Amino acid sequence: MSDTPAAPEETIGRKNRSMAHNLAVLYIISIVVGFTLCAFLLYLKLVHHINVSGSEQLQGEITSVRALLGTPSGLNAIRQVMQAEERGQDAPTNCILMRIVDPTGKIIVDCPNMRDVLPVSAFPPVGDSRSRKFQANGANYLLRTARLTDPNSEARGWVLQIGIDLAEHDQLIGVYRLYLFLFGLGAFLFAIPSSYIVVKRGLKPLDELSGSIKNITGSRLNTRLEADRFPHEMQPVIESVNAMMARLENSFQRLTHYSGNLAHELRTPINNLMLEAEIALSQDRTPEEYQDIISSSLTEYERLAAVIDKLLFLARADNEKNDLMFEKLDAGAEVEEVVDYFSDEASSAGITLLHSVDASFWGDRTLFRRALSNLISNAITYTPAGGEISISSSKGSNGEVDIVVTDTGCGIYSEHLPFLFDRFYRAKAGSQHSGTGLGLAIVKAIMEMHNGDVSAWSRPGHGTAITLHFPQHPSLKNKVTAEV
């Protein structure tokens, strides 16, 4: 049981290795692999060159022997050299090993050093122009068999067996192999510190970026990173960070504005309730006076309850956007139900309510009615007596449906339109109209829950038009978006 938590910790430790460490390791591996490949190719080239050199040396000796045998005393000269070598006189340190044999394999003359080392059968057959490697007594030899072209040897069928000791060649190859190993080890040891230095220097802009981001605090959300200070490869990251900071600053400002408005909306009715309670308790009151105070308090309670209800709805809308009861709605019938509900209020205010809607769309019945009710209620509030409110519809080419609520009220100035659907925003602050500033925010939240949108057009003194845009099928759009 005690060993169980260790595995996740080890996994986390392996995953959290620094990028500099990983890059340095890759850099070292690339250096070692690159050097190894180059050294291996050079080694192969050297071995090939030495082998070619040995073959050329043998060919040169064959030519020399043929030329010597072409003289009258050539064979005797060769025998004298071999006898001197056998007696240990004038024996070269790297003697060419040669032998002349007849067609039966009988040795005519040979080098004493090769008698017990290189038998006749070790040499390639006559006519094979290629050299053959042969190993004997721990040493390597390069062997060749060649025809003799002088008249005497050619008439008797003599052939030349010649070889060369590759000890010096092997020693040269071994030294080169050792040097390559030492150079490779040195490159590896050099690559370790140099790679970390190079990587650290290369990642220095990341440290600068981290330091710049650390300096950004809640009171400095307007700070933006200077893209010119960083390499070209980091430009997308800088742009993303600056865009994120812009969104955070905007959200923070909205949150600050929202918190201030929320505090104001809750403080006003609470202060009214406290004031009325203090007045009521300052002296004895008649039952009728207490009833008036309680009735006034009840009004403030209703106002508080309405604000809280709207705030709760917006909070749920932010977290439950897909928890809707979608059904095919007859827009005409739904609009008529809502219009009937407001008909008495509009008639009392001297406002005409008109509707001409012929469309159907997918949506949540309760939420659609709430959004439409908020728009009609707003229109009645800001439309003077004798004005008109109309609800109409239109269909798009892809099956979208627009529901438009138009009034002939006071209108809204263009600078207010971008903020019209923000929470607690009031386009006519200080007027005789009161409200929480949450009605249009709720409309926007409802449309976002339907994956639709809401837009406003207004002209001061002529009225306002609010358009609810419903997509073809919100639930299908959600599914397609999730799959993509």
Image: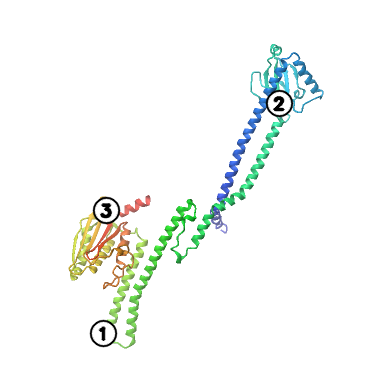
- The kind of residue tagged 3 is Glu
Q: Are marks 2 and 1 in contact (CB under 8 Å)?
A: no
- How far from the left and from the top, in percent, is residue 76? 77, 16
> What numbered label is drawn on residue 400?
3
- Taking 261 as reference, is 368 above or below it? above
> What numbered label is drawn on residue 288?
1
Q: Residue at x 60, y 41 (%)?
A: 35
Sequence-first disc among 2 and 1: 2
- How far from the left and from the top, in percent, is residue 311? 34, 67
Separation of marks 2 and 3 at Cα, in angstroms: 94 Å
Render colour scheme:
rainbow
Sequence-first disc among 2 and 3: 2
Sequence-first disc among 3 and 1: 1
Of helix, strand and loop, which one carries label 1?
helix
Q: Residue at x 61, y 47 (%)?
A: 191
Of helix, strand and loop, which one carries label 3?
loop
Q: Are marks 2 and 3 in contact (CB under 8 Å)?
A: no
Q: Residue at x 58, y 41 (%)?
A: 34
Q: How many marks?
A: 3
Separation of marks 3 and 1 at Cα, in angstroms: 57 Å
Identify the residue position indicated by label 2 in the image. Answer: 164
Separation of marks 2 and 1 at Cα, in angstroms: 135 Å
Of helix, strand and loop, which one carries label 2?
strand
- How far from the left and from the top, in percent, is residue 94? 74, 28
- Mark nearer the viewer, 2 or 1: 2
Question: Residue lying furthest front in this view?
Answer: 228
